Each structure stands twice: as structure tokens, then as C-alpha cells.
Image (cartoon, grey):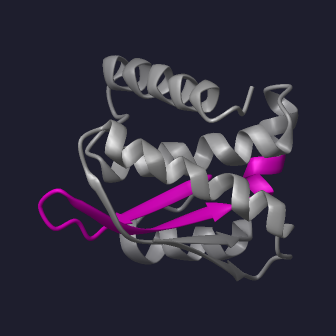
Amino acid sequence: MINFFYEDCLSLKKNSEENLKKTTQLFEKEGFKCGEISVVFCSDAFLLSLNKKYLNHDYFTDIITFPYNEGEVISGDLFVSLDRAKENAIENKETFSRELSRLVIHGFLHLCGFNDKSSEEIKVMRLKEEEYLKLFGFT
């Protein structure tokens, strides 16, 4: 089950939320079951405060993922900066909708155990993101 929340930002249109809900199918594709997922859309300032408080990082980021998995059941909280999503979309010449979907998929992949610390991990993560963006029609 996926729930959407908003912190220090405007809310998305309901059809945007509905489109993002289908991305939870990736858990099954990766061999997991979907548990309780919270996606919190927020401002840069809010996400920066979380980044400092919980990760000791004093810089902006586009997403932070907190997993609460139990075996094959994937649960967790994703915090996504709508400010960063907008900037990323402009920088990468993508639509806001596609970039936002990529960030949510990125967070879900982290919940499934994928990392993006090394160049090889980043490569795998980007390939998976593209695979799921295409699968779910975010092209």
C-alpha cells in the first residue's frame, strides 16, 4: 500500500498520484511484496533538514529513503524534494512528471537493496530506472 503526504510544498494532482501508484509493481518484479510505503513530497529546505539530522549531510539532495523491510515485504518512507525534481527535469531536459517518477522508482530500488555509491552501482541503478520508466509508460 502506498500513501502520499506533503510537507512544506503544494500537493500534486490526484492523477499524478494515481500514475505513481502503479510503480509499486516493481517490488513484485524484483521478487518482493509491497508493504506500507509512504512517499512524502517536500521542499528543499525540509529535505535538507532531514539530511542533516539523520545522515549528517549538509547539502541538498533529491530523495532520502528510510527502509523498514521485513524479509520479502518492502516497507519504508521516501522523502522527495519537489524543488530538486523541478531542477533535475530542467537540467536533464525531461518533463517534471518523468523526473518525479524516476525519483520514486529510484527510492523503491533503494528499498529493494540497490545502492548507488560506486560507479558500477550507479550504472545498474540508472539501467533499472530506465527499465521501469519504460515499463510503466513514463517515456
Is 75 drawn above or below residue 129 in the view shown? below
Horizontal side of 71 relative to 17 (left or right) equals left
Q: Residue at x 79, y 58 (%)?
A: 16
Residue 62 locus on image (x, y percent) = 62, 52
Q: Magenta part of the protein: which range?
A: 61-86
Q: Residue at x 37, y 34 (%)?
A: 116
Is 69 drawn above or below residue 99 in the view shown? below
Residue ranking furthest to the left: 71
Horizontal side of 22 relative to 127 (left or right) equals right
Residue 108 locus on image (x, y percent) = 43, 50
Q: Is residue 61 visible?
A: no
Q: Is residue 70 visible?
A: yes
Q: Compare residues 136 and 109 and report the one nearer the observer.
A: 136
Horizontal side of 39 relative to 18 (left or right) equals left
State yes or no: residue 85 in magenta.
Answer: yes
Q: Compare residues 130 and 30 and report the one nearer the observer.
A: 30
- Quadrant of the image containing the C terminus: top right
